[in-house]
Image (spheres, rainbow, N blue to C red):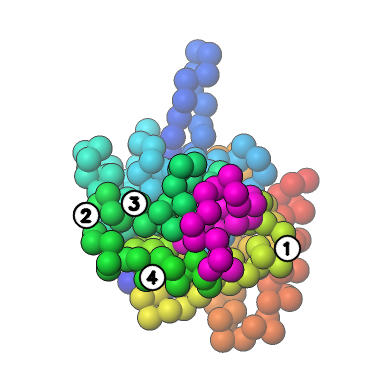
Amino acid sequence: MSTVLRVELLAKTYKAGDGDFFAVKDVDLEVSQGEFVAIMGPSGSGKSTLLHLISGLELPSRGTISLCDINLTDCSDDERTRVRSEKIGFVFQFFNLIPVLSALENVVLPLLMAGHKESAIHNRAISLLTDMGLGNHLQKRPKELSGGQQQRVAIARAMLANPPILMADEPTGNLDTKTGFDVLRLLQSACRAPQRQALILVTHDPRVAALADRVLFMRDSEIVGETHNPDLATNPENAAQFLYTIQQKWEVLMS
């Protein structure tokens, strides 16, 4: 499988008093086409900052980020914006929907602004929203939707262009258990579909992480361990053992 993301010695520092505070410290990471990677860690460990860095939303203090063979650290602001719109589907922890637009309009707007024709994306947007249980809510505005429904709109928006990589920051945080896992299965299916999108997902929930091919553990701004189950896709019965392994490592991480 081809590598869609390669990160080397990535670091982000902020000034704190007379010194520097590391939000992310010397992270090395590779993600392959079709791979589902979960990132776990306590609050403040650097998970969200890492997502923002590798998606080009923030600039690193040092290190390199290669996304689909494009070096983001050498790109201008305009180039990074273009790469994000073409290569990344980002699901934020908070929905970032436009209040005056309908669910359908929120999903198609980014691609319309990028110059895509409405006729080319309209039917796919409706199909995605319908698959997420929102077929009867296409014309509703965010305030008319529950938190869980708004998050599903945000996920549909991220998936619409079939980007090579999806990034999600606690995407099930505002969903009930059943709806959350339905949405996760939909995200997971993007990794198995013919286009084999990669997925990087931040979570605090070992049950969510257990759906991934690989789990990275962060503490104090660094990746301090990982576990993986390369047979998970073909041997679902391994999921229980994988979950147990994640839970054990999570308990150690939080101790």
Give the number of the disc on residue 177: 1
Mark in front: 1 vs 2: 2
The residue lying at 37 percent from left, 57 percent from top is 108
The amino acid type found where label 3 is placed reads Pro
Asked where in the image residue 242 lies, by quadrant, the reply is bottom right
The amino acid type found where label 2 is placed reads Gly
Which percent across, then down, holds residue 178?
A: 71, 67
User: How many residues crowd mark 2 within 10 Å: few (<14), some (14–19), many (20+)?
Assistant: few
Q: Which residue is mark 3?
A: 110
Give the alpha-carbon distance from disc 2 to disc 4, as whole Å: 16 Å
Give the alpha-carbon distance from disc 4 to disc 1, as whole Å: 26 Å
State which tag comes first along the sequence, 2 or 4.
Answer: 2
Q: Which residue is mark 4?
A: 124
The residue lying at 50 percent from left, 13 percent from top is 18
Q: Which residue is mark 2?
A: 115
SS under mark 3: helix
The residue lying at 32 percent from left, 46 percent from top is 64
Residue 155 visible in image:
no
Q: Is residue 145 above or below residue 21?
A: below
- Please give left or right for residue 8 compared with residue 139 in the image: left
State which tag comes first along the sequence, 3 or 2.
Answer: 3
The residue lying at 25 percent from left, 37 percent from top is 77
The span shown in magenta is 133-156
In front of the other: 92 or 70 = 92
Mark in front: 3 vs 1: 3
